[in-house]
Amino acid sequence: MLFKNGILLYFITILNQYNCIIVETPLGKVSGNQIDVLSKHVNEFLGIPFGLPPINEFRFSKPRPTQPWNGIWNATYPRIACYRTKSKAPPEVQESEDCLYLNIWTPVNKENQTLKPVMFWIYGGYFTQGYIDRDGYNGSVLAALGDIVFVSANYRLDAFGFLYGNNETAPGNVGWYDQNLALQWIQKNIQSFGGDPNSVTIFGESAGSTSVAAHIVSPLSNKLFHRAILQSGSIYKYQYLHRKNATKENNLELAIKMSKAFNCSQNHDQWLNCLRNIHPKSIVNYTL
């Protein structure tokens, strides 16, 4: 009994030393850290899954929501970024197709327990680069000074996120579906972190701003948030409206051209399945 008590006391000491925070969500328990930001306390949760890994036969497909877990999900460290155009990615950043994770920063205010407005950040990078753990995308300061809950989520990029295969297993624009799934996750889970699901603002810059515009006009997304901020990008930008190849037919042509580069059979089902078996780094190198 003394031994068990000793273990319990040791565990509590470890939690206190690192200011560990445990939150109960509909999916399971999540552990994060309490950090000090500009003389204020902020709870930080890094790398919470919102989608199952879009790998193997699920490459190019719409994301699937994450499933409940047992035990405590460790959200005290960042996860791996989605694959990006290699020439523009810092060499120290690891990449994977298993990348559908989100970060949350929420202010600590024991005197005011009312739910906080939520701000959902979408990063830019011409849909070929970017990730939530990049320097400058840390939401702790905005959470501390703005008294809001800040959320950011990875989404698939380049061919992984925007290849069009002309069927339900490769419908195109699945990077935007990733963002939509993150917004659904917020509606179902953010209250556990002190956020108000009825007061969600989405905002982004460059390609992130273009994404915001897409969600504004999408019937799949526009009931999942309440305000929007566009910073420099729009789906109505000149290069999107006037590109000669901005049609389904031409985008399908580009996908088939890539499959030919990997010597895939040109039977419709076969070339898509073939591309799903190509090493992800080879696809990244092709799209440089």
Image (cartoon, grey):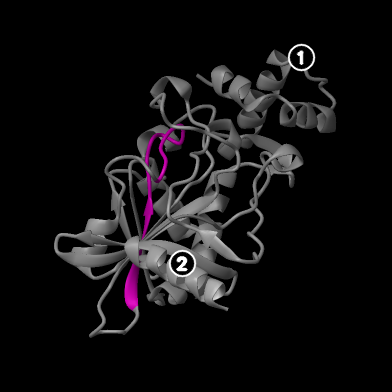
**Picture quadrant where residue 172 is located:** top right
Is 108 or 89 nearer to us in this picture?
108
Side of 146 relative to 283 (left or right): left
Residue annotated with mark 1 = 263
Residue 158 image position (x, y, % from top left)? 53, 32
How busy is the neighbourhood of tag 1: few (under 14 within 10 Å), some, or many (20 plus)?
A: few
Q: Residue 127: percent from the left, percent from the top? A: 45, 36
Secondary element under disc 2, as helix, strand or loop, is: helix
Left or right of 281? Residue 128 is left
Residue 11 badge: 2
Reply above or below: 128 against 201.
above
Residue 16 horizontal/vertical position (percent): 35, 67
Residue type, numbered disc 1:
Asn
Q: CA distance from mark 1 to mark 2?
A: 56 Å
| Disc 1 secondary structure class | loop
Front residue of 143/79: it is 79
Kindly identify the residue that appears in the image at 47 percent across and 25 percent down.
85
Q: Which residues are magenta?
A: 116-132
Vertical relation: 118 (above or below) 196: above
Query: What residue appears at the point 46 percent right and 64 percent down from the top-left corner?
Result: 31
Q: Which residue does the image show at 52% across and 38% down from the upper left? A: 82
> On screen, 130 above or below 38?
above
User: Does the magenta run of residues contain 281?
Assistant: no
